[in-house]
Image (cartoon, rainbow, N blue to C red):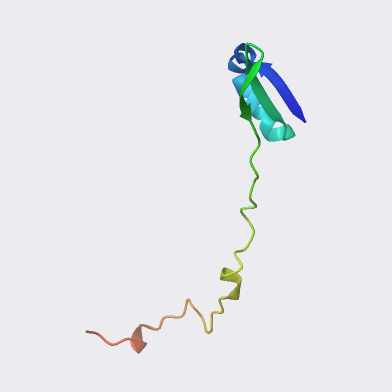
Amino acid sequence: MQTVLNVNEAKTNFSNVLATVENDLVTVTIMRYGHPVAQIVPIERHNRTKTDPLLSRIVIKGDPCENDADDWEEA
């Protein structure tokens, strides 16, 4: 869906325009003197909780919280 606003309407209601673009995933075209000059388009959101495929292949053997200070030599 696309919405058309003139510059004055977009400026006056900019916060609401951004909320509409974000929530309703609509494109807003800004017009000046009847000619399109800009568009505000929603961006693709990325799922931040998705596991990276490379990280899912890591295997930890043993207890990572185990105190193994005795296994290391002092320099």
Image coordinates of residue 38 in percent, x first then y, are 60, 25
Image coordinates of residue 1 in percent, x first then y, are 77, 31
Q: Quadrant of the C terminus?
A: bottom left
How many marks the image carries: the answer is: 0
The residue nearer to you, when weighing 34 against 75, is: 34
Which residue ends up furthest to the front in the rendered image? 35
Which residue ends up furthest to the right in the rendered image? 1
Using the image, determine if residue 37 lies above or below residue 55.
above
Image coordinates of residue 18 in percent, x first then y, are 63, 28
Using the image, determine if residue 12 lies above or below residue 71.
above
Residue 20 visible here: no
The residue nearer to you, when weighing 10 against 55, is: 10
Image coordinates of residue 11 in percent, x first then y, are 58, 16
Residue 50 visible here: yes
Name the residue rendered at 63%, 40% in the picture.
Answer: 43
Name the residue rendered at 28%, 87% in the picture.
Answer: 73
The residue nearer to you, when weighing 39 against 54, is: 39
Using the image, determine if residue 27 lies above or below residue 6.
below
Residue 3 placement: quadrant: top right
Using the image, determine if residue 51 lies above or below residue 22.
below
The residue nearer to you, when weighing 54 against 73, is: 54
Name the residue rendered at 66%, 28% in the picture.
Answer: 19
